Image (spheres, rainbow, N blue to C red):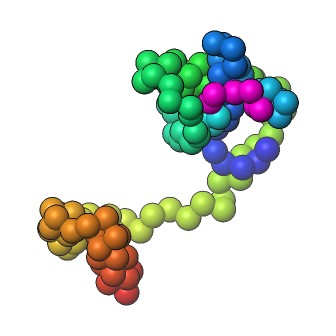
Amino acid sequence: SDVPLIKPVAAAMVGYIDGQLVLNPTLEQMKHSRLNLTVAGTKDAVLMIEGAADFLPEDLMIEAVTFGHNAIKTQCEALEELGKVAGKEKKYDTIKPPVEGLQEMVDEKYTAQLDEIYNSGLSKEDLSSAISDFSETVVA
């Protein structure tokens, strides 16, 4: 693909059936699974975990995430190899460079206010609302 990703991203589903972790279980297998876990990431890191479990212990959940990430590593390595074989040029001309100095200006102007919001002790709902209002101020 010509999409200018720095590195491949992949995902894996993990089930837990009859005491065994199962990679990418079928729909039929999932009817008997005590775990429905989706793990996404790169070969270097897990980026997202989503799922549901039937009261499984923490160490098994960690093992399941690791199991899923190991599958992701294999997928990402295969995608890197495919990219080398396909040899398609990436399209970097669609990426706009950041405005020089913008991040520093925003940090200087708004960090104290944002820290104050986060340290205010607001409820989750009020904090979300305050951050949304603050974002509108920054963007305006």
User: Overall secondary structure of the magenta stretch?
Assistant: loop
Quadrant in the rendering for residue 51: top right
Residue at x-position 50% and y-position 62%: 97
Q: Magenta residues? A: 30-35
Residue at x-position 56% and y-position 32%: 54
Residue 79 in sight from this viewpoint: no
Residue 34 among magenta residues: yes
Q: How many marks?
A: 0
Of residues 5 and 87, the one nearer the viewer is: 5
| Residue 53, placed above or below residue 81 | below
- Report the residue that reaches farthest toward the top: 19
Quadrant in the rendering for residue 19: top right
Q: Is residue 29 left or right of residue 113?
A: right
User: In the picture, which quadrant includes the C terminus?
Assistant: bottom left
Residue at x-position 16% and y-position 64%: 121
Of residues 68 and 85, the one nearer the viewer is: 68
Residue 104 among magenta residues: no
Residue 94 spot, x, y in % from top left? 66, 62
Quadrant in the rendering for residue 8: top right
Of residues 111 and 60, the one nearer the viewer is: 60
